[in-house]
Amino acid sequence: MDNIFYYSSVFIALIMFVSLYRAVAGPTILDRIIGVNAIGSKTVPLLILIGLMYERVEMFIDIALAYAMLNFVAVLAASRYFQKRKGLDRE
Amino acid sequence: MIYFISFLIFLSLLFMFGAAVGLLRLPDFYSRLHASGMLDTTGLLLFVIAVSAFCLWQDFSVNTVFLVIKLIFIAVFIFITSPTATHAIVDAGIRAGMKPWKKNKMEE
């Protein structure tokens, strides 16, 4: 069972690198926000997997919940900030 | 039981992989947002079900029940906040005047 958790956390880290490409090289600003949102929403299962591997799930679940809230507030604030600006489709 | 948990984790990883492929390959920012928002939420739900089944299978006690309640709270929170964030990003794109992608741009 430990091997399953190990390999799935490595796979989630690879998926996060794939999303990082969209966050770095996205054509518009909103693409970058989507990439950051995708990375942040994959942080929660990764933290729970780390907790399962260290056998301290009850501590890491609180950290995962805090990360979920932080990600939500960050994405909402960024999209509200860029809402009024024209020319979001340019580089 | 171990096969059930492994199958759920594999399914959730498959959904997340689909979200990453959609994020890379789709042509427009609206469609990318659709793939990312929907599939990530489903993947996290399956993952939470798998982890809570594993924790209840390891030892069934009061502490584990509280832990599973916390996990369910994470799932409910993500189910409320992920569509809200998606809607906020789409609203920013619409108000900035970005046109959705069409297949044949020459025919317009």
Image (spheres, grey):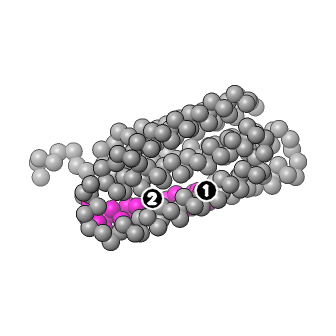
- Front residue of this view, candidates B24 and B90: B24
**Mark 1: amino acid:** Tyr
Q: Main secondary structure of the magenta part?
A: helix
What range of the chain is rendered magenta?
B76-98
Relative placement, left or right, of A48 versus B98 is: right
Disc 1 residue crowd, few under 14, some 14–19, many 20+, Cα 10 Å: some
Residue on which the image places disc 2: B86
Distance from the alpha carbon under mark 2 to that under mark 1: 17 Å
- Front residue of this view, candidates A25 and A57: A25
Is B93 part of what is drawn in magenta?
yes
Given the image, what chain letter belongs to the residue carrying mark 2? Answer: B
**Mark 2: amino acid:** Thr
- Residue situated furthest right in the rendering: B61
The secondary element bearing badge 2 is classed as: helix
Report the residue at 47% width, 67% height from top: A77
Report the residue at 46% width, 52% height from top: A36
Disc 2 residue crowd, few under 14, some 14–19, many 20+, Cα 10 Å: many
The secondary element bearing badge 1 is classed as: helix
Report the residue at 34% width, 48% height from top: A26
Residue A33, horizontal then vertical, whole percent = 42, 56
- Residue situated furthest left in the rendering: B107
Residue on which the image places disc 1: A67
Q: Which mark is residue A85?
A: none
